[in-house]
Amino acid sequence: MDKMFSLSGKVALVTGAAGGLGAHISKTLGGAGARVVLAGRRIQPLEHLVAELAALGIEACAVSMDVTDDASITAGLDKAESKFGLVDLAVCNAGNAITKKSLSLSAQEWDQVIDVNLKGCWLVANKVAQRLVAADRPGAVLMVSSILGHRVAGGVLPYAVSKAGLEQMTKALALEWARHGIRVNALAPGYIETDLNREFFASDAGQAMIGRIPQRRLGQPADLDGALLLLASDASRYMTGTSIVVDGGHLHSSL
């Protein structure tokens, strides 16, 4: 069974790798045998993560990449290929959120979220897929979505819209790229505890939100590992266009 979930010999690109969730995803993929390309706009934290992964015996490299900029993605992939070869797996994890009621949301703020979360995922996935098709190689794309792609919450309109769009993009690209041997799936986390949200979830409002999760707890990054490795590896070789929700039952909580 371990061989089914192995990523040995694979090259995995993780966007938004400097963040807490991105760093964990990178460690998990590397721990399964992949060589990991850490992508993000700020190179210094990525280089620190490269050193951290090296201490764990994981091969990694850092590339500067703005997922909203076509030329930046091309340059990042070129650098990744020069180091490790063709990217087999793209994890589109880079994301952005603005918490604000829709009536006070500006067009610029809307674009800021949609461009990263939706357009950015398409640009990265498309660039990786084009190179795989040109090389006649199979591969996989994993979109990091959210339970807010399935349900809504107040004050996060562009985020929820972008994640819902990502769910539909997953299906559309899976349909188009199946003939090329490229699988496209989505991982939809619920509320996962990270350094960025820990303070909020310790508050009364945060504790009330946790109380609405059927398992009565926040998810931990490690809770994503099973679904992540399933969708990233050949264990899911007959799965494409699928979204796996990991949320402690939150989507099924009563309204």
Image: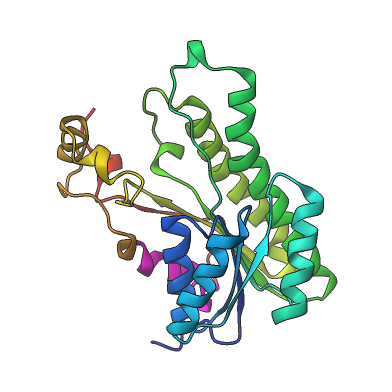
Quadrant showing the N terminus: bottom left
Is residue 77 visible in the rendered image? The answer is yes
170 sits to left or right of 72 = left
**Horizontal and vertical percent position of residue 163:** 51, 40
Horizontal arrangement in the rendering, residue 204 relative to residue 123 (left or right): left
**Which quadrant of the rendered structure holds the C terminus?**
top left
- Residue 124, given in percent of the width and then of the height, sits at 69, 55
Q: In the depicted view, which residue is nearer to us: 175 or 248? A: 248
Which residue occupies 47% across, 77% down? 53
Q: In this view, does 109 lie to the left or right of 19?
A: right
Q: In this view, does 197 lie above or below 184?
A: above
Q: Which residue lies furthest to the top in this view?
A: 103
**Residue 54 or 240: which is nearer the viewer?**
54
Point out residue 102 in the picture as x, y percentages from the top left corner.
Answer: 48, 16
Name the magenta segment's main secondary structure: helix
Q: Is residue 228 magenta?
A: yes
> For the magenta stretch, what is the residue range?
224-237
Residue 132 inside the magenta-drawn segment = no
Does 33 sit above or below residue 232?
below
Regarding residue 235, the answer to whether it shows in the image is no
**Along the horizontal axis of the image, is 238 left or right of 155?**
right
Q: Percent from the top left, x then y, of residue 33?
A: 50, 84
Residue at 53% across / 65% down in the picture?
239
Q: How is the image coloured?
A: rainbow
In terms of depth relative to the viewer, which is nearer, 182 or 193?
193
Residue visible at 26% across and 37% down? 200
The residue sitting at 50% across, 12% down in the picture is: 104
> Among all residues in the image, which is located at the extreme right?
134
Residue closest to the eye, 154 or 195: 195
Quadrant position of residue 15: bottom right
